[in-house]
Amino acid sequence: MRQIDESQLTQADLTARQIPDPVGRLRYLQSVASAPPSVSRWKSRITIGFLTLVVLGMVAAPLSLRMPGAAHAASRKPPSQPALPQILRVEPEVAPSADVWSVEKASDFETYSNGLRIENQYAVRHRPRAYVAYSIADPEATGGEKRTVPAGIVYHTTESLQAPFEPSQNNLLKRVGESLIDYVRRRQCYNFLIDRFGRVFRIVNESDAADHAGHSVWADDRYFYVNLNDSFIGISFEAQTGDGETSTRVGDAQVRAAAMLTEMLRNRYKIPGGNCVTHAQVSVNPSNMQIGYHVDWASSFPFEKLGLPDNYATPSPAVSLFGFSFDASFAQRAGERLALGASNADRELVQRAQIEHLSLTAYRKMLHRRYLKITARHRG
Protein backbone atom coordinates (compact mmCIF):
# COMPACT_ATOMS: atom_id res chain seq x y z
CA MET A 1 0.00 0.00 0.00
CA ARG A 2 1.18 3.49 -0.72
CA GLN A 3 1.78 6.02 2.01
CA ILE A 4 -0.54 9.05 2.01
CA ASP A 5 0.52 12.53 2.95
CA GLU A 6 -1.57 15.46 4.29
CA SER A 7 -2.69 16.56 0.85
CA GLN A 8 -3.83 13.03 0.04
CA LEU A 9 -5.84 12.93 3.27
CA THR A 10 -7.62 16.10 2.21
CA GLN A 11 -8.42 14.59 -1.16
CA ALA A 12 -9.62 11.40 0.49
CA ASP A 13 -11.87 13.41 2.72
CA LEU A 14 -13.37 15.18 -0.28
CA THR A 15 -13.89 11.89 -2.03
CA ALA A 16 -15.50 10.35 1.05
CA ARG A 17 -18.01 13.18 1.28
CA GLN A 18 -19.29 12.20 -2.17
CA ILE A 19 -20.12 8.64 -1.07
CA PRO A 20 -23.80 8.72 0.04
CA ASP A 21 -23.75 5.45 2.00
CA PRO A 22 -22.28 6.08 5.52
CA VAL A 23 -21.00 2.50 5.86
CA GLY A 24 -19.34 2.60 2.43
CA ARG A 25 -17.85 5.98 3.27
CA LEU A 26 -16.30 4.58 6.46
CA ARG A 27 -14.85 1.55 4.66
CA TYR A 28 -13.31 3.76 1.97
CA LEU A 29 -11.59 6.01 4.49
CA GLN A 30 -10.29 3.05 6.48
CA SER A 31 -8.83 1.53 3.30
CA VAL A 32 -7.00 4.68 2.19
CA ALA A 33 -5.76 5.27 5.72
CA SER A 34 -3.92 1.93 5.98
CA ALA A 35 -0.28 2.78 6.70
CA PRO A 36 2.86 0.84 5.44
CA PRO A 37 5.31 -0.74 7.90
CA SER A 38 7.54 2.30 7.72
CA VAL A 39 4.91 4.45 9.30
CA SER A 40 4.73 4.23 13.05
CA ARG A 41 1.77 2.34 14.50
CA TRP A 42 0.58 5.27 16.64
CA LYS A 43 0.35 7.58 13.58
CA SER A 44 -1.74 5.01 11.75
CA ARG A 45 -4.12 4.75 14.70
CA ILE A 46 -4.44 8.53 14.99
CA THR A 47 -5.19 8.83 11.26
CA ILE A 48 -7.85 6.12 11.34
CA GLY A 49 -9.36 7.53 14.52
CA PHE A 50 -9.50 11.02 13.13
CA LEU A 51 -11.16 9.93 9.88
CA THR A 52 -13.62 7.70 11.78
CA LEU A 53 -14.68 10.67 13.91
CA VAL A 54 -15.14 12.73 10.75
CA VAL A 55 -17.42 10.07 9.26
CA LEU A 56 -19.35 9.59 12.48
CA GLY A 57 -19.82 13.34 12.69
CA MET A 58 -21.07 13.43 9.10
CA VAL A 59 -23.54 10.61 9.91
CA ALA A 60 -24.68 11.97 13.26
CA ALA A 61 -25.24 15.54 12.10
CA PRO A 62 -28.16 14.83 9.76
CA LEU A 63 -29.60 12.36 12.27
CA SER A 64 -29.57 14.99 15.01
CA LEU A 65 -31.40 17.37 12.75
CA ARG A 66 -34.12 14.78 12.21
CA MET A 67 -34.53 13.81 15.88
CA PRO A 68 -36.76 16.26 17.83
CA GLY A 69 -35.11 17.59 20.95
CA ALA A 70 -31.80 15.82 20.25
CA ALA A 71 -29.84 19.05 20.56
CA HIS A 72 -31.07 19.43 24.15
CA ALA A 73 -30.72 15.79 25.21
CA ALA A 74 -27.44 16.38 27.00
CA SER A 75 -28.91 19.17 29.10
CA ARG A 76 -31.96 17.22 30.24
CA LYS A 77 -32.16 16.58 33.95
CA PRO A 78 -33.20 13.21 35.33
CA PRO A 79 -36.75 13.02 36.72
CA SER A 80 -36.91 14.64 40.13
CA GLN A 81 -39.46 14.58 42.89
CA PRO A 82 -42.64 16.06 41.38
CA ALA A 83 -43.39 19.59 42.47
CA LEU A 84 -46.88 20.49 43.62
CA PRO A 85 -48.96 21.39 40.55
CA GLN A 86 -50.29 24.90 40.58
CA ILE A 87 -53.92 25.14 41.62
CA LEU A 88 -55.84 27.25 39.14
CA ARG A 89 -58.66 29.40 40.48
CA VAL A 90 -61.60 31.19 38.99
CA GLU A 91 -60.86 34.52 40.68
CA PRO A 92 -58.33 34.00 43.48
CA GLU A 93 -58.13 37.62 44.61
CA VAL A 94 -61.67 39.00 44.48
CA ALA A 95 -61.68 41.91 46.93
CA PRO A 96 -64.58 42.83 49.26
CA SER A 97 -66.86 45.44 47.75
CA ALA A 98 -66.27 48.13 50.38
CA ASP A 99 -64.67 48.91 53.73
CA VAL A 100 -66.60 47.59 56.72
CA TRP A 101 -66.08 49.01 60.18
CA SER A 102 -67.48 48.48 63.65
CA VAL A 103 -70.30 50.90 64.47
CA GLU A 104 -71.22 49.77 67.97
CA LYS A 105 -69.92 47.07 70.29
CA ALA A 106 -71.59 46.03 73.54
CA SER A 107 -71.19 43.04 75.81
CA ASP A 108 -73.89 41.03 74.07
CA PHE A 109 -73.91 42.35 70.48
CA GLU A 110 -71.99 44.36 67.89
CA THR A 111 -73.03 46.09 64.68
CA TYR A 112 -71.15 47.03 61.52
CA SER A 113 -71.39 49.61 58.80
CA ASN A 114 -72.75 47.15 56.21
CA GLY A 115 -75.78 46.31 58.39
CA LEU A 116 -74.33 43.21 60.05
CA ARG A 117 -75.31 42.50 63.64
CA ILE A 118 -73.57 39.77 65.62
CA GLU A 119 -75.03 38.32 68.83
CA ASN A 120 -72.29 37.72 71.40
CA GLN A 121 -74.16 36.41 74.43
CA TYR A 122 -73.25 32.79 73.66
CA ALA A 123 -69.59 33.33 72.73
CA VAL A 124 -67.03 30.97 74.25
CA ARG A 125 -63.27 30.60 74.14
CA HIS A 126 -61.29 27.65 72.81
CA ARG A 127 -57.62 27.05 72.00
CA PRO A 128 -55.87 30.11 70.51
CA ARG A 129 -55.70 30.09 66.72
CA ALA A 130 -52.24 29.03 65.49
CA TYR A 131 -51.24 27.13 62.38
CA VAL A 132 -48.67 26.74 59.62
CA ALA A 133 -49.28 27.81 56.02
CA TYR A 134 -47.13 25.54 53.83
CA SER A 135 -45.55 27.01 50.72
CA ILE A 136 -46.56 25.58 47.34
CA ALA A 137 -42.88 25.93 46.39
CA ASP A 138 -41.94 23.44 49.13
CA PRO A 139 -43.59 20.13 48.17
CA GLU A 140 -42.28 18.26 51.19
CA ALA A 141 -43.32 21.07 53.56
CA THR A 142 -39.99 21.11 55.36
CA GLY A 143 -40.84 24.59 56.57
CA GLY A 144 -43.80 26.91 56.64
CA GLU A 145 -45.15 30.25 57.73
CA LYS A 146 -46.53 30.36 61.25
CA ARG A 147 -49.73 32.40 61.52
CA THR A 148 -52.50 33.34 63.90
CA VAL A 149 -54.72 35.25 61.42
CA PRO A 150 -57.34 33.18 59.54
CA ALA A 151 -56.54 32.44 55.90
CA GLY A 152 -60.05 31.55 54.75
CA ILE A 153 -63.64 30.59 55.52
CA VAL A 154 -65.33 27.18 55.45
CA TYR A 155 -69.13 27.13 55.13
CA HIS A 156 -71.18 24.35 56.73
CA THR A 157 -74.75 23.31 57.32
CA THR A 158 -75.76 21.97 60.73
CA GLU A 159 -77.79 19.07 59.25
CA SER A 160 -80.06 19.48 62.29
CA LEU A 161 -83.81 19.02 62.72
CA GLN A 162 -85.74 21.45 60.49
CA ALA A 163 -89.20 22.68 61.48
CA PRO A 164 -91.47 24.15 58.76
CA PHE A 165 -90.52 27.78 58.22
CA GLU A 166 -93.92 29.40 58.64
CA PRO A 167 -95.63 31.72 61.17
CA SER A 168 -97.57 28.92 62.86
CA GLN A 169 -94.26 27.23 63.79
CA ASN A 170 -92.60 30.33 65.18
CA ASN A 171 -92.27 29.09 68.78
CA LEU A 172 -90.96 25.70 67.63
CA LEU A 173 -88.45 27.38 65.33
CA LYS A 174 -87.11 29.44 68.25
CA ARG A 175 -86.87 26.45 70.59
CA VAL A 176 -85.06 24.35 67.99
CA GLY A 177 -82.68 27.23 67.29
CA GLU A 178 -81.87 27.74 70.96
CA SER A 179 -81.25 24.04 71.45
CA LEU A 180 -78.92 24.04 68.44
CA ILE A 181 -76.95 27.02 69.78
CA ASP A 182 -76.48 25.25 73.09
CA TYR A 183 -75.29 22.10 71.32
CA VAL A 184 -72.68 23.74 69.07
CA ARG A 185 -71.55 26.01 71.92
CA ARG A 186 -70.79 23.09 74.21
CA ARG A 187 -68.89 21.32 71.46
CA GLN A 188 -67.20 24.50 70.14
CA CYS A 189 -68.21 23.47 66.63
CA TYR A 190 -68.14 26.75 64.69
CA ASN A 191 -67.02 30.33 64.96
CA PHE A 192 -70.40 31.59 63.73
CA LEU A 193 -73.90 30.18 63.42
CA ILE A 194 -76.67 31.73 61.26
CA ASP A 195 -80.12 30.64 62.42
CA ARG A 196 -83.32 30.27 60.36
CA PHE A 197 -84.25 33.93 60.98
CA GLY A 198 -80.91 35.19 59.66
CA ARG A 199 -79.50 36.06 63.07
CA VAL A 200 -75.71 35.72 63.36
CA PHE A 201 -74.40 34.23 66.60
CA ARG A 202 -70.74 34.23 67.54
CA ILE A 203 -70.00 30.79 69.02
CA VAL A 204 -66.20 30.50 69.25
CA ASN A 205 -64.27 33.76 69.28
CA GLU A 206 -62.47 34.56 66.02
CA SER A 207 -59.14 34.61 67.83
CA ASP A 208 -59.66 30.93 68.67
CA ALA A 209 -59.96 27.78 66.58
CA ALA A 210 -63.29 25.97 66.31
CA ASP A 211 -63.60 22.23 65.67
CA HIS A 212 -65.45 22.49 62.39
CA ALA A 213 -63.36 21.12 59.48
CA GLY A 214 -61.66 17.98 60.81
CA HIS A 215 -59.45 16.23 58.27
CA SER A 216 -59.32 18.71 55.41
CA VAL A 217 -57.14 20.17 52.67
CA TRP A 218 -57.21 23.40 50.67
CA ALA A 219 -54.73 25.53 48.73
CA ASP A 220 -54.47 28.96 47.17
CA ASP A 221 -51.94 30.17 44.62
CA ARG A 222 -49.11 30.41 47.19
CA TYR A 223 -49.87 28.17 50.16
CA PHE A 224 -51.61 24.96 51.07
CA TYR A 225 -53.34 24.15 54.35
CA VAL A 226 -54.12 20.89 56.14
CA ASN A 227 -56.72 20.31 58.86
CA LEU A 228 -58.39 23.69 58.58
CA ASN A 229 -59.81 24.11 62.09
CA ASP A 230 -57.06 26.57 62.98
CA SER A 231 -56.44 28.20 59.62
CA PHE A 232 -60.03 28.82 58.45
CA ILE A 233 -63.05 30.41 60.14
CA GLY A 234 -66.08 28.11 60.38
CA ILE A 235 -69.52 29.51 59.52
CA SER A 236 -72.56 27.23 59.70
CA PHE A 237 -76.12 27.72 58.49
CA GLU A 238 -78.97 26.16 60.41
CA ALA A 239 -80.02 24.00 57.48
CA GLN A 240 -79.91 20.62 55.83
CA THR A 241 -78.53 19.80 52.37
CA GLY A 242 -79.33 16.74 50.30
CA ASP A 243 -76.91 14.73 48.19
CA GLY A 244 -76.09 16.35 44.88
CA GLU A 245 -78.49 19.27 45.25
CA THR A 246 -77.86 22.31 43.07
CA SER A 247 -80.48 24.62 44.62
CA THR A 248 -80.03 25.97 48.12
CA ARG A 249 -82.48 25.30 50.93
CA VAL A 250 -81.47 28.22 53.15
CA GLY A 251 -83.73 31.20 53.47
CA ASP A 252 -83.16 34.64 51.99
CA ALA A 253 -82.52 36.13 55.44
CA GLN A 254 -79.73 33.63 56.01
CA VAL A 255 -78.13 34.42 52.65
CA ARG A 256 -78.22 38.17 53.31
CA ALA A 257 -76.70 37.70 56.76
CA ALA A 258 -74.00 35.41 55.38
CA ALA A 259 -73.13 37.96 52.70
CA MET A 260 -72.66 40.71 55.31
CA LEU A 261 -70.71 38.44 57.66
CA THR A 262 -68.47 37.27 54.82
CA GLU A 263 -67.85 40.84 53.70
CA MET A 264 -66.87 41.89 57.23
CA LEU A 265 -64.52 38.94 57.78
CA ARG A 266 -62.84 39.28 54.41
CA ASN A 267 -62.34 42.98 54.99
CA ARG A 268 -60.96 42.46 58.49
CA TYR A 269 -58.57 39.62 57.65
CA LYS A 270 -57.90 40.27 53.95
CA ILE A 271 -59.25 36.86 52.98
CA PRO A 272 -59.18 36.15 49.22
CA GLY A 273 -62.38 34.98 47.57
CA GLY A 274 -60.66 31.78 46.45
CA ASN A 275 -60.25 30.75 50.09
CA CYS A 276 -63.97 30.94 50.85
CA VAL A 277 -65.06 27.33 50.35
CA THR A 278 -67.59 24.75 51.44
CA HIS A 279 -67.03 21.85 53.81
CA ALA A 280 -67.63 19.37 50.99
CA GLN A 281 -64.76 20.90 48.99
CA VAL A 282 -62.15 20.43 51.72
CA SER A 283 -63.24 17.32 53.63
CA VAL A 284 -61.07 14.20 53.27
CA ASN A 285 -60.93 10.73 54.81
CA PRO A 286 -57.33 9.64 55.56
CA SER A 287 -58.43 6.08 56.40
CA ASN A 288 -59.22 5.33 52.74
CA MET A 289 -57.52 8.37 51.13
CA GLN A 290 -60.74 9.61 49.52
CA ILE A 291 -62.30 13.05 49.32
CA GLY A 292 -65.86 13.95 50.26
CA TYR A 293 -66.06 12.46 53.75
CA HIS A 294 -68.53 15.26 54.55
CA VAL A 295 -70.64 16.66 51.72
CA ASP A 296 -72.55 19.54 53.28
CA TRP A 297 -72.87 22.33 50.69
CA ALA A 298 -71.68 19.84 48.05
CA SER A 299 -73.13 21.64 45.00
CA SER A 300 -75.69 24.15 46.22
CA PHE A 301 -73.72 26.95 47.85
CA PRO A 302 -74.82 30.43 46.61
CA PHE A 303 -71.33 31.83 45.96
CA GLU A 304 -72.54 34.71 43.78
CA LYS A 305 -75.11 35.92 46.32
CA LEU A 306 -72.32 36.16 48.90
CA GLY A 307 -70.11 38.19 46.56
CA LEU A 308 -67.74 35.27 45.96
CA PRO A 309 -66.33 33.49 42.91
CA ASP A 310 -67.74 30.03 42.23
CA ASN A 311 -64.93 27.73 43.42
CA TYR A 312 -66.60 24.44 42.58
CA ALA A 313 -64.66 24.00 39.32
CA THR A 314 -61.30 24.54 41.06
CA PRO A 315 -59.27 21.29 40.91
CA SER A 316 -59.52 19.64 44.31
CA PRO A 317 -56.22 20.32 46.13
CA ALA A 318 -56.54 17.06 48.06
CA VAL A 319 -56.46 15.16 44.76
CA SER A 320 -53.86 17.33 43.03
CA LEU A 321 -51.44 17.68 45.90
CA PHE A 322 -51.80 14.46 47.86
CA GLY A 323 -53.29 11.88 45.50
CA PHE A 324 -56.67 11.48 47.20
CA SER A 325 -59.23 9.66 45.07
CA PHE A 326 -63.01 9.31 44.90
CA ASP A 327 -65.30 6.36 44.31
CA ALA A 328 -68.24 5.83 41.99
CA SER A 329 -70.74 7.16 44.52
CA PHE A 330 -68.95 10.50 44.89
CA ALA A 331 -70.60 12.14 41.87
CA GLN A 332 -74.05 11.23 43.18
CA ARG A 333 -73.32 12.50 46.68
CA ALA A 334 -71.44 15.59 45.57
CA GLY A 335 -73.43 16.61 42.51
CA GLU A 336 -72.19 17.85 39.15
CA ARG A 337 -70.62 21.10 40.34
CA LEU A 338 -68.34 19.60 42.97
CA ALA A 339 -67.64 16.48 40.87
CA LEU A 340 -66.26 18.79 38.16
CA GLY A 341 -63.51 20.05 40.47
CA ALA A 342 -62.62 16.49 41.44
CA SER A 343 -62.47 15.38 37.80
CA ASN A 344 -60.30 18.36 36.85
CA ALA A 345 -57.86 17.46 39.60
CA ASP A 346 -57.81 13.79 38.61
CA ARG A 347 -56.88 14.66 35.01
CA GLU A 348 -54.13 16.91 36.34
CA LEU A 349 -52.86 14.03 38.47
CA VAL A 350 -52.70 11.67 35.47
CA GLN A 351 -50.72 14.23 33.46
CA ARG A 352 -48.29 14.78 36.32
CA ALA A 353 -47.71 11.04 36.70
CA GLN A 354 -46.92 10.77 32.99
CA ILE A 355 -44.46 13.66 33.17
CA GLU A 356 -42.70 11.96 36.05
CA HIS A 357 -42.64 8.60 34.21
CA LEU A 358 -44.57 6.89 37.01
CA SER A 359 -47.67 4.77 36.98
CA LEU A 360 -50.71 6.51 38.44
CA THR A 361 -50.75 4.02 41.33
CA ALA A 362 -47.09 4.64 42.17
CA TYR A 363 -47.53 8.40 41.90
CA ARG A 364 -50.56 8.35 44.22
CA LYS A 365 -48.67 6.29 46.80
CA MET A 366 -45.81 8.77 46.76
CA LEU A 367 -48.24 11.67 47.33
CA HIS A 368 -50.02 9.70 50.07
CA ARG A 369 -46.72 9.35 51.90
CA ARG A 370 -46.18 13.09 51.54
CA TYR A 371 -49.61 13.81 53.05
CA LEU A 372 -49.04 11.50 56.01
CA LYS A 373 -45.64 13.02 56.63
CA ILE A 374 -47.00 16.58 56.57
CA THR A 375 -50.02 15.82 58.78
CA ALA A 376 -47.76 14.07 61.30
CA ARG A 377 -45.58 17.17 61.44
CA HIS A 378 -48.71 19.34 61.62
CA ARG A 379 -49.97 17.43 64.65
CA GLY A 380 -46.57 17.69 66.27
Image: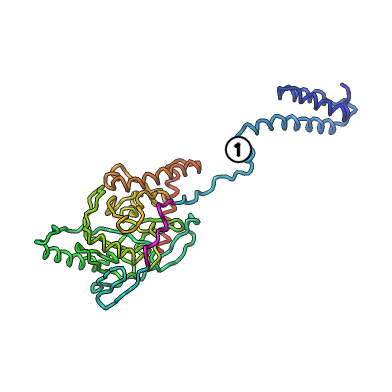
Q: What stretch is highlighted in magenta?
A: 87-98
Residue indicated by mark 1? 69
Residue under the image location 36 percent in, 59 percent down: 227
Image height check: is 377 above or below 105?
A: above
Res. 38 in view = yes
Image height check: is 155 above or below 20?
A: below
The quarter of the image holding the N terminus is: top right
- 136 or 336, nearer to the observer: 336
- Would residue 89 be counted in the magenta stretch? yes
Tag 1, which secondary structure? loop
Position in image of residue 305 (x %, y %): 30, 57
Position in image of residue 154 (x %, y %): 32, 59
In the image, taking residue 325 as reference, residue 13 lies left or right, namely: right
Q: How is the image coloured?
A: rainbow
- Badge 1, how many Cα within 10 Å: few under 14, some, many 20+? few
Question: Mark 1 belongs to which amino acid?
Answer: Gly
Residue under the image location 16 percent in, 58 percent down: 162
The quarter of the displayed image where residue 35 is located: top right
In the image, taking residue 320 as reference, residue 205 lies left or right, namely: left
Residue under the image location 14 percent in, 66 percent down: 175
- 230 or 48, nearer to the observer: 230
Image height check: is 314 above or below 4?
A: below
The quarter of the displayed image where residue 336 is located: top left
Image height check: is 344 above or below 184?
A: above
- Would residue 370 be counted in the magenta stretch? no
Res. 368 in view = no
The quarter of the image holding the C terminus is: bottom left
Magenta-highlighted stretch: main secondary structure? Answer: loop
Q: How many labels were placed on the picture?
A: 1
